[in-house]
């Protein structure tokens, strides 16, 4: 790949605000007043209120059990946090500056520290006291483009620990290096001169040899980028897959021999639209494509077409044999959550119901027959934030956990934590209180033995106005947490995390 291709990609990224003002649509900057009014009627919106602090240190009140003394490490979480800056409010849930929350487990105790991901954009806006730049779904009021993708980078989606570095990840631009002790941002992660500033996805995958694969997507010019980074953190290989209209691809998978990219028919046809979000169009009659790429030859691609669906997150993928691949994921009917609901939470107009059903699905792809079969589990209800045991990466994994929203109730948000043993088909679950909204939980190995793990995660109790932290023994999930404590503040609802043993 030549330098000019990269240079072209870089200048074309996220330049929606380069449009003349006359072509810019009406402002979609969120409405603080409307949100605050809605919050009075719908207290479950608390998780979208956001913080105005750049640093948080909360105290814990122990509710139940004790911190297992053998649990030692940092549980990091990331997510959009500063939804309001001055009198401005972001228009979309994914737009706010990210904040890393750290829950430090040490010798039977736990402590909290949160700090803004100090991207150039986040620092400039916090200092200015107003929103300065366009974001994924926020536009108008003369907001600036920031000049490049990283000019809009809020670093708010996820975290990965690789080659001794903790990286805060966004989707449209660079990763940022975070000091795991101070939570200070050390700077932008530049893998090479040529790839500096290019999109680096939020869900990289770690290979058996410790190397890291990732994707990025660019809408103008339309392209998918593949990255392969050595266990030591060196960029080994990049490859560009040109697209006609780039599909939005939030997560992907690897097996021992292949890279698996699922491309929903949600593609960037409207390059001249007012926001990045509005570039994308859902084509309900077009197939979802499964791209299977040979890791040893990134130009070797098989495409299998299937029914249209949207997907945010996958569990784990594995080779079944030379021509078959298995994986699991949360399948959504369409991308209405990001195109509708995640706007509506910001002005408070959301009714709390997902606009599209999401189901746990196990897939089997046959590359010889170019076919795929799905085993769906609608009985789990709406599901998301699927996680597997990292020790089972790339293998025919046994355990998967996910958040579920039980049907037939007026309860808002994910209130069920579900563990599936795929080898036996056994399901265990634990329901939190009706006023608690679960956030992503992680599987954290407890010992060297298979099936011995902790399940760790947070939830927001919107009634008490406090975020809580729970630790479950994996196999005894149904018995409830072995430890639960409540912070003295409500953290903004976040996205993804990682656990770093110490
Ligand atoms: Fe994600």
Image (tube, helix red, strand yellow):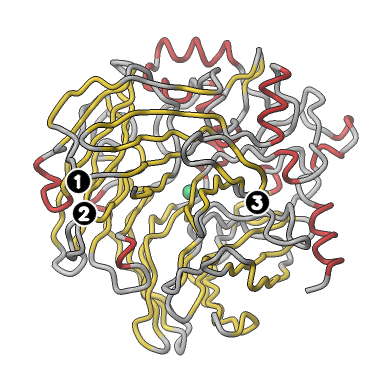
Q: Is residue 439 visible?
A: yes
Q: Mark 3 sits on what residue?
A: 189
Residue 237 in the image: state x and y as whole percent. 65, 73
Q: How many marks?
A: 3
Residue 318 in the image: state x and y as whole percent. 37, 75
Label 2, label 3: how many angstroms apart (C-alpha)?
A: 31 Å
Q: Residue at x 28, y 52 (%)?
A: 444
- Beta carbon of the mark 3 residue lies under 8 A of ligand 1: no
Residue 391 in the image: state x and y as whole percent. 30, 65
Q: Nearer the viewer, residue 457 or 35?
A: 457
Q: Counting residues from the N terminus, which is met first, the one under dot 1 or under dot 2?
A: 1
Q: Counting residues from the N terminus, which is met first, the one under dot 2 or under dot 3?
A: 3
Of badges 3 and 1, nearer the viewer stands 1
Q: Mark 1 sits on what residue?
A: 70
The answer to whether mark 1 and mark 2 are in CB contact below 8 A is yes
Q: Mark 2 sits on what residue?
A: 446
Label 1, label 2: how many angstroms apart (C-alpha)?
A: 8 Å
């Amino acid at each position: 790949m030549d330098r000019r291709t990269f240079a072209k990609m870089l200048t074309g990224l996220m330049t929606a605000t380069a449009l003349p003002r006359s072509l810019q649509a009406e402002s979609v900057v969120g409405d603080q007043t409307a949100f605050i009014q809605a919050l009075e009627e719908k207290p479950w919106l608390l998780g979208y209120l956001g913080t105005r602090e750049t640093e948080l240190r909360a105290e814990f009140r122990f509710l139940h059990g004790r911190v297992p003394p053998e649990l030692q490490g940092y549980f990091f979480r990331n997510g959009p946090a500063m939804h309001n800056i001055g009198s401005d409010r972001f228009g979309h849930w994914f737009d706010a500056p990210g904040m890393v929350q750290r829950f430090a487990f040490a010798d039977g105790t736990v402590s909290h520290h949160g700090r803004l991901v100090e991207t150039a954009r986040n620092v400039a806006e916090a200092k200015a006291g107003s929103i300065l730049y366009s974001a994924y779904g926020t536009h108008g009021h003369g907001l600036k483009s920031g000049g490049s993708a990283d000019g809009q980078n809020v670093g708010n989606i996820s975290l990965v620990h690789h080659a001794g570095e903790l990286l805060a990840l966004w989707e449209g631009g660079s990763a940022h290096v975070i000091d795991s002790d101070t939570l200070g941002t050390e700077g932008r992660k530049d893998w090479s001169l040529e790839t500096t500033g290019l999109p680096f996805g939020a869900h990289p995958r770690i290979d058996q040899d410790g190397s890291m694969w990732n994707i990025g997507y660019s809408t103008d010019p339309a392209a998918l980028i593949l990255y392969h980074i050595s266990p030591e953190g060196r960029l080994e290989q990049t490859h560009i897959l040109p697209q006609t209209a780039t599909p939005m691809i939030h997560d992907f998978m690897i097996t021992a021999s292949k890279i698996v990219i699922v491309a929903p028919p949600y593609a960037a046809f409207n390059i001249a639209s007012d926001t990045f979000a509005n570039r994308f169009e859902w084509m309900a009659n077009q197939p979802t494509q499964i791209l299977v790429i040979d890791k040893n030859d990134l130009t070797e691609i098989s495409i299998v077409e299937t029914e249209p669906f949207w997907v945010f997150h996958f569990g784990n993928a594995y080779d079944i044999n030379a021509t078959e691949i298995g994986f699991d994921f949360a399948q959504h009917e369409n991308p209405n959550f990001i195109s509708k609901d995640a706007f509506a939470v910001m002005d408070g107009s959301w009714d709390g119901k997902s606009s599209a059903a999401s189901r746990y699905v196990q897939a089997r792809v046959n590359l010889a027959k170019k076919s795929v079969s799905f085993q769906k589990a609608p009985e789990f209800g709406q599901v998301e934030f699927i996680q597997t045991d990292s020790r089972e990466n790339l293998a025919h994994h046994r355990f998967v956990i996910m958040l579920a929203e039980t049907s037939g109730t007026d309860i808002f948000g994910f209130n069920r934590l579900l563990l599936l043993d795929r080898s036996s088909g056994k399901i265990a679950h634990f329901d939190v209180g009706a006023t608690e909204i679960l956030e992503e939980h992680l599987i954290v190995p407890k010992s060297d033995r298979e099936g011995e793990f902790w399940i760790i995660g947070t939830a927001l109790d919107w009634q008490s106005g406090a975020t809580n932290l729970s630790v479950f023994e994996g196999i005894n999930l149904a018995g409830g947490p072995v430890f639960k404590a409540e912070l003295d503040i409500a953290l903004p609802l976040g996205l993804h995390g990682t656990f770093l043993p110490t």
